[in-house]
Image: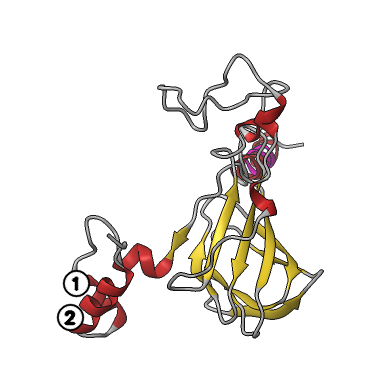
Amino acid sequence: MAPKLVFLMLMVFLTISFNQVLASDPDMLQDVCVADLTGKPKVNGFICKENITANDFFTTILGTPGATNNTFGSVVTGANVEKVPGLNTLGVSLSRIDYAPGGLNPPHTHPRATEMVFVLEGELDVGFITTANVLVSKSIKKGEVFVFPRGLVHFQKNNGNVAAAVISAFNSQLPGTQGISVTLFASNPPVPDNVLTMAFQIGTKEVEKIKSRLAPKK
């Protein structure tokens, strides 16, 4: 086999391997690495604590419905590494999302994980938008599953007249969430008005009105 062809094949293999490594959390290098949430050194994840217990790998946090009496009529309860320290380096986490009748989990992204939802109760209209600006959507009900690819903007809406709930699974111990509207209109420091007026083709008064509605409650 010609040296140039061997070199080309090697570069392709390394590129594929590198992309696979970046596709989820790094692999663990020991049996367990329970997060020391009080540790001072800042690393990509958390440093390991010395003494572990069964409670580091346990939580009841997803067993209770969250309060949905808020602006959007939904609430996310996370069981990630910050709540379950034993998840550190394991590359997985869960969340529970509860929706009031008419509630919305507004458009958002998870920069570090793909999300899979399993419907516990009710029915939801869900969807994500591809980078080609194509909406992929479906109505899902109790017992059904839907997947939101990593990094793509997505949403869930309860259009029913009864409450709904899902369990979400992620391939990251801390997937992160960026809500589109809150990120743009309630950041600190704020995004300049002239950026938002041009991006959304609206006036300054409309921008200020949206910002006031999305501002954190004092």
Kindly tell me whether residue 95 is visible in this rendering.
Answer: yes
Dividing the picture into quadrants, the one containing residue 217 is bottom left
Above or below, 58 relative to 176:
above
In the rendered image, residue 211, in percent from the top left (x then y), is placed at 26, 72
Above or below, 194 relative to 50:
below
- For the C terminus, the image quarter is bottom left
For the rendered model, the colour scheme is: secondary structure
In the rendered image, residue 204, in percent from the top left (x then y), is placed at 17, 80
Q: Regarding mark 1 in the picture, which secondary structure is present there?
A: helix
Query: Which numbered disc covers residue 193?
Result: 1
In the rendered image, residue 89, in percent from the top left (x then y), is placed at 63, 32
Callout 1: 10 Å neighbours few (<14), some, many (20+)?
some
Question: Dots 1 and 2: beta carbons under 8 Å?
Answer: yes
Q: Earlier in the sequence, mark 1 or mark 2?
A: 1
Q: Regarding mark 2 in the picture, which secondary structure is present there?
A: helix
* Type of the residue with mark 1: Asp
* Type of the residue with mark 2: Thr
The residue beneath circle 2 is: 204
Total numbered labels placed on residues in the image: 2
- The magenta stretch spans which residues? 9-14
Residue 5 is left or right of residue 71, and the answer is right
Residue at x 30% of width, y 74% of height? 213
Residue 27 part of the magenta-drawn span: no
**Along the line of sight, which residue is nearer the eye, 215 or 12?**
215
- For the N terminus, the image quarter is top right
Callout 2: 10 Å neighbours few (<14), some, many (20+)?
some
Q: Main secondary structure of the magenta part?
A: helix
